[in-house]
Image: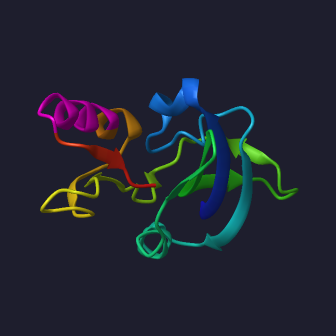
C-alpha cells in the first residue's frame, strides 16, 4: 500500500460557504486534485501532511479552498486501483474571526475555526453583542 498526498482545490459561491470544512474539496465533484508526493509508509505521509495548511481565501463573491489530504492507495501491477479508500487525514484549516477597526482590540483574532459555518455563527453572536467582527479570509 502507498500513501499519496493530494492537493485539491475548489471554488465556493456564497450559497455554499457553509460547506467549507475539512474534506470539502475531496467530496466535491468539480474539485481538481493533483499528486504532491507518494510515500511508502503512512507515518511519512502524515508527517509531510502536518507541514501543510489549508488555504481559504475570498475573491469577490467566491471563496477558494486549497487543501491537502493523504489517501491510501493499493494498485495492481498495471497501476490500476485494487481497492478504493477514503482519505485518512486532511491539512489543518484555520478560519479566523477578527474584531473590526474602531474597537480597542481591532484586528485581533477572537477565535479560529476549522469550518466556515462555526466562524459565521461566531460573527453573528458578536454582532448580537454590538461588536463588529468579520471572517478574516
The count of marks equals 0
In front of the other: 103 or 51: 103
Residue farthest along the front direction in this orientation: 102
Looking at the picture, the colour scheme in use is rainbow
Residue farthest along the right direction in this orientation: 78
- Establish if 137 lies above or below 84: below
In front of the other: 8 or 84: 8
In front of the other: 97 or 23: 97
- Establish if 4 lies above or below 56: below
Picture coordinates of residue 136, whole percent (x, y): 39, 55
Picture coordinates of residue 75, whole percent (x, y): 73, 54
Determine whether, in the image, residue 110 is placed left or right of residue 3: left
Please tell me in which quadrant of the rendered image residue 38 appears.
bottom right
In front of the other: 78 or 39: 39
Magenta stretch: residue 129 in it?
A: yes
Determine whether, in the image, residue 108 is placed left or right of residue 68: left
The residue depicted at 62 percent of the width and 39 percent of the height is 61
The residue depicted at 54 percent of the width and 56 percent of the height is 69
**Where the N terminus falls, by quadrant?**
bottom right
Determine whether, in the image, residue 91 is placed left or right of residue 129: right
The residue depicted at 49 percent of the width and 59 percent of the height is 54
Magenta stretch: residue 125 in it?
A: yes
Magenta region, main secondary structure = helix
Picture coordinates of residue 88, whole percent (x, y): 45, 50
Q: What segment carries the magenta color?
A: 120-130
- Establish if 59 lies above or below 19: below
Determine whether, in the image, residue 39 is placed left or right of residue 90: right
Picture coordinates of residue 124, whole percent (x, y): 25, 30
Residue farthest along the top direction in this orientation: 15
Please tell me in which quadrant of the rendered image residue 130 appears.
top left
Amino acid at each position: 500500500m502507498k500513501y499519496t498526498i493530494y492537493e485539491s482545490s475548489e471554488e465556493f459561491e456564497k450559497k455554499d460557504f457553509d460547506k467549507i470544512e475539512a474534506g470539502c474539496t475531496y467530496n466535491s465533484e468539480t474539485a481538481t486534485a493533483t499528486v504532491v508526493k507518494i510515500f511508502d509508509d503512512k507515518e511519512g505521509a502524515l508527517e509531510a501532511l502536518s507541514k501543510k495548511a489549508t488555504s481559504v481565501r475570498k475573491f469577490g463573491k467566491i471563496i477558494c479552498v486549497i487543501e491537502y489530504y493523504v489517501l491510501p492507495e493499493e494498485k495492481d501491477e498495471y497501476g490500476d486501483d485494487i481497492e478504493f479508500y477514503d482519505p485518512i487525514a486532511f491539512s489543518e484549516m484555520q478560519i479566523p474571526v477578527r474584531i473590526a477597526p474602531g474597537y480597542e482590540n481591532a484586528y485581533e483574532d477572537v477565535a479560529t475555526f476549522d469550518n466556515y459555518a462555526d466562524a459565521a455563527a461566531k460573527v453573528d453572536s458578536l454582532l448580537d453583542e454590538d461588536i463588529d467582527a468579520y471572517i478574516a479570509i
